[in-house]
């Protein structure tokens, strides 16, 4: 006989934190009915094992931050994984307490240190920072400053 919905949810949570929507999707894919899933998720939330805000904050200040993601990409990634919009926004704000530009500068300097100077460095750096999810203003300002020396 298969495991209960609650047992499966606990097994998934023992491996890593999950968002409510993410856990709901996984349990549904494993054939559990909607009523059992809803009851399980409510029970886990009451027990404190299911915390969307805490999960979003943990991802934003941990793995997503280490990947050098900017606020735009970080928020999109959190929401893609199942974070509610409010939890994603709060987590991104917490991750960028020192400001977006400080984080973008670290990413840009690390990227530039690994590449030889070239005539297209400004455009390449701008594309890199844009892919990482930094705002257009920050990308342009840093590309000019770090490549051209314009302050």
Image (cartoon, rainbow, N blue to C red):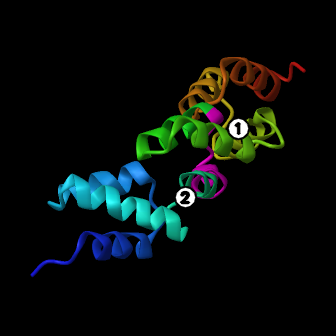
Q: Position of residue 65 (x, y in %)?
A: 64, 50
Mark 1, Cα crowd under 10 Å, few <14 / some 14-19 / many 20+, is many
Q: Position of residue 137 (x, y in %)?
A: 73, 17
The part of the image, by quadrant, that contains residue 121 is top right
Circle 2 sits on which residue?
A: 51
| Number of numbered discs visible in the structure rendering | 2
- Element at badge 2? loop
* Residue 88 higher or lower than 27, as above or below: above
Distance between the alpha carbons at the discs numbered 1 and 2? 33 Å
Mark 2, Cα crowd under 10 Å, few <14 / some 14-19 / many 20+, is some
Q: Earlier in the sequence, mark 1 or mark 2?
A: 2
Residue 43 visible in the shown view: yes
Residue lying farthest left? 1
Residue lying farthest bottom? 1
Instruction: Write the residue at 42% across / 66% down.
Output: 43
Residue lying farthest right? 151
Tell us which disc is closer to us: 1 or 2.
2
Instruction: Write the residue at 54% across / 58% down.
Output: 51
Circle 1 sits on which residue?
A: 108
Q: Which range is magenta? A: 59-71
Instruction: Write the residue at 28% across / 59% down.
Output: 37
Viewer-proximal residue, 52 or 112?
Answer: 52
Viewer-proximal residue, 38 or 50?
Answer: 38
* Residue 50 higher or lower than 78, as above or below: below
86 relative to 105 in the view: left or right:
left
138 relative to 43 in the view: left or right:
right
In the rendered image, which quarter contains the N terminus? Answer: bottom left
22 relative to 75 in the view: left or right:
left
């Amino acid at each position: 006989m298969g495991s209960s919905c609650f047992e499966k949810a606990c097994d998934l949570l023992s491996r890593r934190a999950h968002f409510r929507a993410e856990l709901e999707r996984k349990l549904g894919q494993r054939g559990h009915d909607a009523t059992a899933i809803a009851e399980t998720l409510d029970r886990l939330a009451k027990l404190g094992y299911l915390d969307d805000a805490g999960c979003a904050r943990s991802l934003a200040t941990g793995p997503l931050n280490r990947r050098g993601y900017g606020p735009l990409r970080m928020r999109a990634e959190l929401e893609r994984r199942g974070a509610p919009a409010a939890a994603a926004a709060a987590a991104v704000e917490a991750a960028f307490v020192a400001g977006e530009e400080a984080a973008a500068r670290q990413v840009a300097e690390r990227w530039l240190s690994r590449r030889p100077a070239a005539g297209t460095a400004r455009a390449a750096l701008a594309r890199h920072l844009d892919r990482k999810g930094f705002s257009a203003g920050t990308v342009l300002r840093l590309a000019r400053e770090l490549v051209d020396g314009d302050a």
